[in-house]
Amino acid sequence: MKKLSIIVSCYNEEKALPLFYAKMERVRQQDFADIDIEFEYLFINDGSKDKTLDIIKRLSNENSKVKYISFSRNFGKEAAMLAGLDAATGDYIAIMDADLQDPPALLRQMYDEITQNHYDRVGTRRVSRKGEPPIRSFCARVFYKLINGISNVEMVDGARDYWFMTSQVADSIKSMREYNRYSKGLNSFVGYNTKWLEYENVERVAGETKWSFWKLFKYALDGITAFSTMPLIISSIVGILFCLVAFIAIIFIIVRTLAFGDPTSGWPSLVCIIVFVSGVQLFSIGVIGQYLAKTYLEVKKRPIYIIKEQNIESQSNDHSKS
Ligand code: UDP
Ligand code: MG
């Protein structure tokens, strides 16, 4: 019998979780009724401050197919998804959010695409951003234009972290042990035949989003530094251009002084130039600093997540390896 592992990262999802589980069980009993397949749930409690863990434990008492991993603190969704992949034992693996924004009704179609149409994985993208503040949608669009222009791997606008994949794809993704995880990039990096399903945005059933604008902004910067070195190239080019301009200006000034003497004037323009060039320098140092900071975090080889408790017998002790 084939097994499907469903990875669900949960951070303060006490309201949404019971609804999610009920809906999933219904999908299992109805949509998958004609297939001999076992569902294994892997709930990753990402340091929730509410009753999420209690709810997961209750579910695991009711159903032995419910497994959980609980982190020692909040490590972020990327770390939670990795922990899920590390622990998943299924032939197929699905990654979903707990808030039902990833419609479970699509699971059967995803399964069919892989088993019948021989795709390696199925991704999902929402074609509308209904229910989202317009300014956020606008920034997202600008970001995808930008990152696709400067990065070699393609980031799909509107792609969600709702995936259905074979265990082979999962193995490839979890083989990348980097600390700064930007899953859209990692997913695109591994390749494989991907089928994209599209759907209208669904609003979360309960609870609220964990992504503030500032968090999203920092995540966008992570994405850029993790998958493009273009900012470094741009600052080098700007540096070279400024050197050229300065060189030409020096020759111009020397010639002018020799020809016409040196009338002492023009300090306002000088100040403007100094301020502008200092700005460019500081910006470039900042760009380099971003990359250096990421390198610093990578070389420390800290664990990506730390497990406090779980009901999975660890096959090896490498669950919290870096
Ligand atoms: N999540 C998580 N750790 C975090 C933040 C979020 O595991 O630090 C989970 C959250 O419980 C949910 C999923 O990631 O299952 C997506 O979060 P959310 O719905 O807040 O994001 P949005 O859908 O608004 O982008
Ligand atoms: Mg959500």
Image: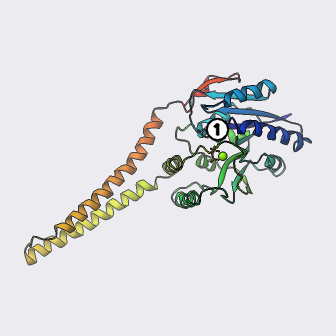
Identify the residue under disc 1: 81
Rendering coords of residue 139 (x, y %): 54, 58
Residue 19 shown left or right of residue 84 in the figure: right
- Considering the image in quadrants, where does the C terminus appear? top right
Above-or-below relation of 322 to 140? above
Residue 92 shows up from this direction: no
How would you rate the neighbour count of disc 1 (Cα within 10 Å): few for under 14, some for 14-19, many for 20 or more? many
Residue 200 shown left or right of residue 300 in the figure: right
Q: Nearer the viewer, residue 262 or 211?
A: 211
- Considering the image in quadrants, where does the N terminus appear? top right
Above-or-below relation of 161 to 319? below
Rendering coords of residue 122 (x, y %): 74, 50
Q: Nearer the viewer, residue 182 or 45?
A: 45
Residue 115 shown left or right of residue 128 in the figure: right
Report the residue that reaches farthest toward the right. Answer: 34
Report the residue that reaches farthest toward the left. Answer: 261
Q: Secondary structure at mark 1?
A: helix
| Residue found 23% across the figure and 66% down from its top | 247
Residue 145 shown left or right of residue 54 in the figure: left
Q: Amino acid at mark 1?
A: Met
Rendering coords of residue 252 (x, y %): 18, 73
- The quarter of the picture where residue 174 lies is top right
Count of labels shown? Answer: 1
Rendering coords of residue 152 (x, y %): 55, 55
| Residue found 53% across the figure and 30% down from its top | 303
